[in-house]
Image (tube, rainbow, N blue to C red):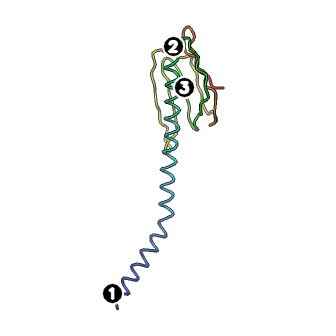
Amino acid sequence: MEKALLTGFGIFLLTSLISLISPFIGIVFNFNNNQNNELYHYANFINKFDIALKQVINNPDFVYFKEIEYPENLNLTLEDNYAKFYFLLDETIQVKILEYSELFQPSVFNNLPSEKYLLYIAKNINYINVSFF
């Protein structure tokens, strides 16, 4: 009789504990999914930007003009022959720096709203010009 009471009370405590913890487990999973989505958007943008720049560098007469989705909380700085991407991930600023063989016209794209833009990349005589329209 005592074993049955202890077992029943143990099952009651276990179900109570699980019902209290389950909402927090859902929050943790949603947080991880959101972070993975943000990282995917940043990586996708940086990859498309890199491919576009390499096309213009390899073909100086080529003008790149295509639609691209600019991610949220991304700042882009172009100076000398470096493209510096600053983005917010897990409440810390992450930096990705890419180096190229050509010089950029110095440009800073800070606090652009997250939406689709037309990315324009063209090579002039001395530098590469990058703009978002």
* Position of residue 30 measured from the top left corner of the image (x, y, whole percent): 51, 53
The residue type indicated by label 2 comes to Asn
**Residue at x 40%, y 78% (from the top left corner):** 11
Residue 123, above or below 35: above
Q: Pick whichever of labels 3 and 1 is earlier in the sequence.
A: 1
Q: Of label 2 and label 3, which has the lower sequence position?
A: 2
x, y percent for residue 71: 57, 36
The residue nearer to you, when weighing 77 against 6, is 6
Q: Quadrant of the C terminus?
A: top right
| Label 2–label 3 contact, CB within 8 A | no
User: x and y percent of residue 17 in the render?
Assistant: 45, 71
Please name the residue that numbered disc 2 is placed on. 59
Give the number of the mark in front: 3 or 1.
1
Which disc is residue 77 wearing? 3
Alpha-carbon distance for marks 2 and 3? 23 Å
Q: Secondary structure at mark 1?
A: helix
Q: Quadrant of the N terminus?
A: bottom left
Find residue 105 and report its horizontal and vertical position in percent: 57, 16
Tag 1: amino acid = Lys
Q: Compared with residue 111, is residue 128 higher up or lower down, i.e. above or below?
A: above
